[in-house]
Amino acid sequence: SGQHWSWNLGDNRSVLKKRTWYSMLERVRASRQKRKLSIPDLASDLVGIIRQAHAEYGRIICPLTGGRDSRVVAALLLHAGVPARYETGGKADSLDVTIAREVAAAAGLPHTVWQVDTEALLSEWSTICRRLVTQTDGMVSLWQIQDILSHPRSVEHLSVTLSGVGSLIARGY
């Protein structure tokens, strides 16, 4: 979902305002309230969400790794017929990069690899941590701090990133 959060200071207290302008989850919940969800229904719902995200925002980014989850998201994007920018962060000889390159080549996907600049990360640690917290709701893994380095400070057009980050946690690994 797209949200805008703002804090206003007034009368020695902070007032939080949250505005949601797009919630794909609400659309899916409404469409399946009266039916039992099957695997084909789930796949159809996910493809519908992807198509809606593309219709609303245009640009889709899909981090591609050696993990199952990112490959499922890539397969859903392909099935939906939605173009995406596929990218992998890491050293050229890492397993994630190697598998992602092979998957992208086999599926004919446009794919880029970027590497974290460790020196920049360490020298700008405080600033990057502040950006990570202010650009997210605070419920983010420190592992994602590398993403802040690859994102511009301001954007002309929003894009959507579809990934499987954190899904292994949900399965209890």
Image (cartoon, rainbow, N blue to C red):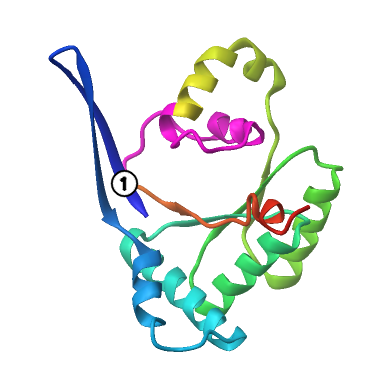
Above or below, comparing residue 112 to residue 58 in the picture: above
Please tell me in which quadrant of the rendered image residue 17 appears: top left
Q: For mark 1, give the secondary structure.
A: strand
Work out whether residue 50 or residue 150 is closer to the camera in this orientation and state it: 50
Above or below, comparing residue 47 to residue 41 in the picture: above
User: Residue 59 location in percent, x, y?
Assistant: 42, 57
Q: Residue at x 74, y 63 (%)?
A: 68
Above or below, comparing residue 67 to residue 155 in the picture: below
Work out whether residue 133 or residue 161 is closer to the camera in this orientation and state it: 133
Q: Residue at x 31, y 41 (%)?
A: 156
User: Residue 143 location in percent, x, y?
Assistant: 67, 34
Q: Amino acid at mark 1?
A: Gln
User: Given the current orientation, which residue lies at the most extreme left position?
Assistant: 11
Q: Is residue 81 visible?
A: no
Q: Residue under circle 1? A: 3
Q: Which residues are magenta?
A: 134-157
